[in-house]
Image (cartoon, grey):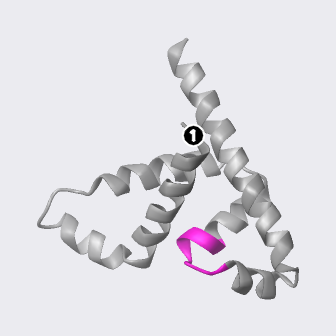
Amino acid sequence: MTMKQIQTDLQEIRYYYAHKDIFDKACDSVVKNAIVEKVSRYNTVIRGASPQLYALYVALYTENNTQLVVADDWNVSEGHIKKLKRKLRDYLLAAFDKNKKEEEQ
């Protein structure tokens, strides 16, 4: 997995949660979209993150907040949120790489 793929996945996850009711409703009549499985994989990996990165993932991607909104809510600078977002992406990349290596053994 690459950092570019992580970024793309996170945007798709944000879209999924912003329109979750549509995806849930469609599951009753159409096969589940692949994003549902991707969300499940990310949710499994994020469980092992630090509480701060976990909270950032929830705030940005499942609650569809902007960095500015999260910065205001957390009473920190937007620059701080940007740094945490980089740490989150780094964490996800390392976690997925670790999982891949473990599967290969």
The span shown in magenta is 59-66
Q: Is residue 47 magenta?
A: no
Tell me the kind of residue under disc 1. Thr
- Please say whether residue 33 is visible from this viewpoint: yes
Question: Looking at the picture, does residue 91 appear above or below residue 7?
Answer: above
Residue that label 1 marks: 2
Instruction: Give the residue at the far front of this rendering.
Output: 4
> Tag 1: Cα neighbours inside 10 Å, few (<14), some, or many (≥20)?
few
Tell me what residue is drawn at x 53 percent, y 50 percent.
42
Residue 64: say if magenta: yes
Q: Position of residue 44 (x, y in %)?
A: 55, 47
Image quadrant in which the N terminus is located: top right
At a point 61% along the width and 31% down the height, the residue shown is 97
Q: Quadrant of residue 61?
A: bottom right
Residue drawn 57% across and 40% down?
Answer: 2
Number of numbered discs overlaid on the protein picture = 1
Residue 69 at x, y = what percent? 70, 86
Q: In this picture, is 95 found above or below 66?
A: above
Height in image: 105 above or below 79? above
- Measuring from the top left, give residue 32's x and y in whole percent: 24, 57
Left or right of 3? Residue 23 is left
Q: Farthest residue in the top direction?
A: 105
92 vs 84: above or below: above
- Tell me if I can see residue 48 in this picture: no
